[in-house]
Amino acid sequence: MSQERGNRRTRIGVVVSDKMDKTVVVRVDDLVKHSVYKKFIKRKVSCKAHDENNDCGVGDKVLIVETRPLSKDKRWRVRQVLEKAVTA
């Protein structure tokens, strides 16, 4: 009998750095409505994510999933590459 894991947060973002080994920096953009002025504000968050096979490159659109702490800053894993960046 296998136990199911709890719901894990997932986010979609763009890879902004792949210079580290097995780690990528992903920027997640979010639109938030201002509580008083009702205008939409862009919020950006950077997350370090584990990329086991070094598949991701700068500009790739990826799906990341929350996981246990893997290092001091790394709490996310790359689940899949949704869209590869176009390289000229």
Image: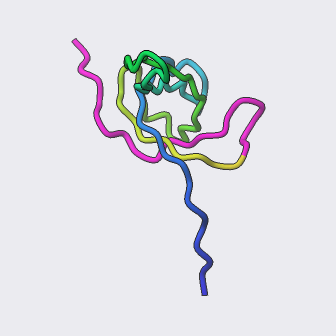
Residue at 48% over, 19% down: 36
Q: Quick one: quadrant of the N terminus?
A: bottom right
Residue 15: name its quadrant.
top left
Q: Residue furthest top?
A: 88
Q: Give the range drawn in magenta.
A: 69-88
Q: Which residue lies furthest to the bottom in this view?
A: 1
47, 71: nearer the viewer: 47
The number of numbered discs placed on residues in the rendered structure image is: 0
Q: Quick one: quadrant of the C terminus?
A: top left
Q: Considering only vertical position in the picture, is 14 above or below 10? A: above
- Residue 68 horizontal side relative to residue 44, left or right: right
Q: Considering only vertical position in the picture, is 72 above or below 68? A: above
Residue 37 position, x and y percent, is 43, 15
Residue 55 position, x and y percent, is 43, 35
Residue at 43% over, 27% down: 30
1, 18: nearer the viewer: 1
Q: Residue furthest right?
A: 72
Residue 2 position, x and y percent, is 60, 81
19 in the magenta segment:
no
- Residue 40 horizontal side relative to residue 64, left or right: left
Q: Considering only vertical position in the picture, is 30 above or below 10? A: above
- Residue 3 horizontal side relative to residue 24, left or right: right
Q: Which residue lies furthest to the front in this view?
A: 36
Snapshot colouring: rainbow
- Residue 69 horizontal side relative to residue 37, left or right: right
